[in-house]
Image (spheres, helix red, strand yellow):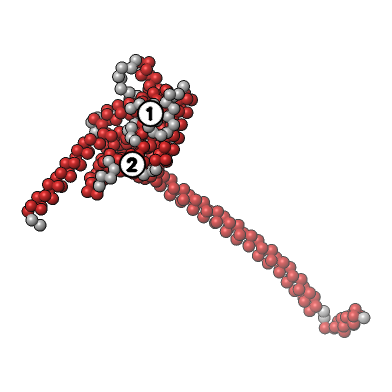
Amino acid sequence: MSWNENKTGASVDAAGDAVLEDALKSFRQSVHAWSDAAYVRPRGEVRVAAHSGWRLATAWALGCVLTAGGVSGAVYERHHRQVLAAQAREAQQQKALQLAEQQRAQVTDADLLATVDSDISRTVPAAMEPLAQLMDESQSQ
Amino acid sequence: MTAETAEEIAAQEFARAQEFSSIVESHRPQIFRFLLASTRDMDLAETLTQECFLKAHRNWAHFRGESSAMTWLMRIAINLQKDHWRNRRLQFWRQTRTNSVDLDEASDWLPSGERSAEQQMLAREQVGHVWKAMSGLSERQRTVFLLRYVEEQELGDIARATGLSEGTVKAHLSRALGKVRAELGGKR
């Protein structure tokens, strides 16, 4: 077949492009030669089987490694989160304890003062009672 | 069913089987060549060729001869190849299992003929450029290009085999040739 014929309808400018024409012809011959050689070659079933064997093993090994990596990563992440949560809980408890301690201290001071006041008021002797009343009256005036 | 009718049916079936065998005999190398050029993988081309004829055998009874047997077989081969690449894209891990030969190896095949060593070298270089340009073509462009320039099919047959219109076939061919020309021009 002549490549000069514009049989394709595509724009093969064969007259102006001899290189393209040559290249296409060589390409066609090359594919035909390769195909003819490949068509009569002995079939490589054993080679394919052997290859697929180790490829399968590699794929399995890779799969196992990825799975193990994924699982251990997830376990580590979970453990890390647990540790952080425990630390946060401990800090919160510590803070609550400190707050309770402070409140207790404040309550104790107030109670003590009230006790002292009441004790003082009780320690006025009965004989001095009229004088104490006079003092109260003078203060109110 | 009478014995005569049964004999007639058996004879017809036998004739159909004989016809199919002769079609396999005559078209198998061409189908294999197209698939080999498309995939650059000998094992895959063999497998797809076998699948093609298996499918053709199953549907042989429905073949009405509206197109030539070659066009019909080529259509099956193109569809099988399309399915193969579609499945392969989905099964991305199988990329590592490809047996495709590289472009240099594919370019090594040339009939010695009457060429000088220098001409052989030049031809090998050109073939390499065409392979390289082909690897940059879309699936359709590559199919149309191979059917036209390797299988030397007519535009009408290519259109029937690919299920495209002749205009679309021409457009694909034109683009494919443009890329081949550019590849050759760039390296000239």
Give the residue drawn at x 44%, y 38%.
B171
> Residue A5 shows which numbered tag?
1
Chain of the residue under the numbered disc 2 shown in the image: B
Q: Classify B95 as above or below A126.
A: above
Tell me where residue B167 appears, x and y as whole percent: 42, 40
Give the residue drawn at x 47%, y 28%.
B182
Locate residue A26 relative to residue A75 in the image: left or right: left
Circle 2 residue: B161
Quarter of the picture holding the N terminus of chain B: bottom left
In this view, the residue farthest toward the left is B3
> Is residue A2 visible to us here?
yes
The amino acid type found where label 2 is placed reads: Ala
Give the residue drawn at x 18%, y 44%.
B16
Chain of the residue under the numbered disc 1 shown in the image: A
Tell me where residue A123 appears, x and y as whole percent: 80, 78
Tell me where residue B155 appears, x and y as whole percent: 36, 37
Q: Classify A37 as above or below B94.
A: above
Relative to the observer, which residue lies in front, A46 or B108?
B108
